[in-house]
Image (cartoon, rainbow, N blue to C red):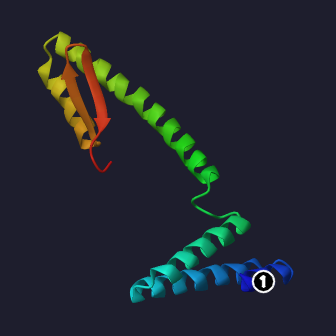
Amino acid sequence: PAALRAAMDDDLNVAGALAVVHDTVRQGNAALDAGDRAVAARAVAEVVRMTDVLGVNPLDPHWAAADSGAESTAMAALDVLVQAQLQARAAARATKDWTTADAVRDRLKAAGILITDGKDGSTWQLAEGQ
């Protein structure tokens, strides 16, 4: 929009440009409240273009790639820790130390990790909402 261009042409007035983004979001929300989907859709398109120009569009694949990398690193670290607990639990079960085996299972459950025992050993997954 012209207002964004004017703000950026004014000595790279990023605060002014963000104000234009905010105003456009507000207009889009008002259009949604009024049931005017066409105006709301135009506002969405403008916000996407403006945030692209400013480098802060949360829909840009750059941000998704950064998030997924951090998430996969965290999941890999969590897997190492959980696997160590599952090995300790398996060792306790092998010696019929049910108190220790149950304590490991209960600690993992309290941390939001569900254990499934099968013929090939135990697997884990995050509980819903974790």
Rendered residue at 56%/50% (across/down): 64
In this view, the residue in front, 96 or 126, is 126
Rendered residue at 21%/27% (across/down): 116
How far across and down, in percent of the image, does residue 47 sit?
61, 73
Point out the image quarter for the N terminus: bottom right
Mark 1: amino acid: Ala
Rendered position, 73 above or below 67: above
Q: How many marks?
A: 1
Rendered position, 54 above or below 33: above
Q: Quadrant of residue 51?
A: bottom right
| Residue 127 placement, left or right of 53 | left
In this view, the residue in front, 78 or 63, is 63
Rendered residue at 73%/81% (across/down): 4
How far across and down, in percent of the image, does residue 31 sit?
47, 86
The answer to whether residue 104 is seen in the rendering is: no
How far across and down, in percent of the image, does residue 55 sit?
70, 63
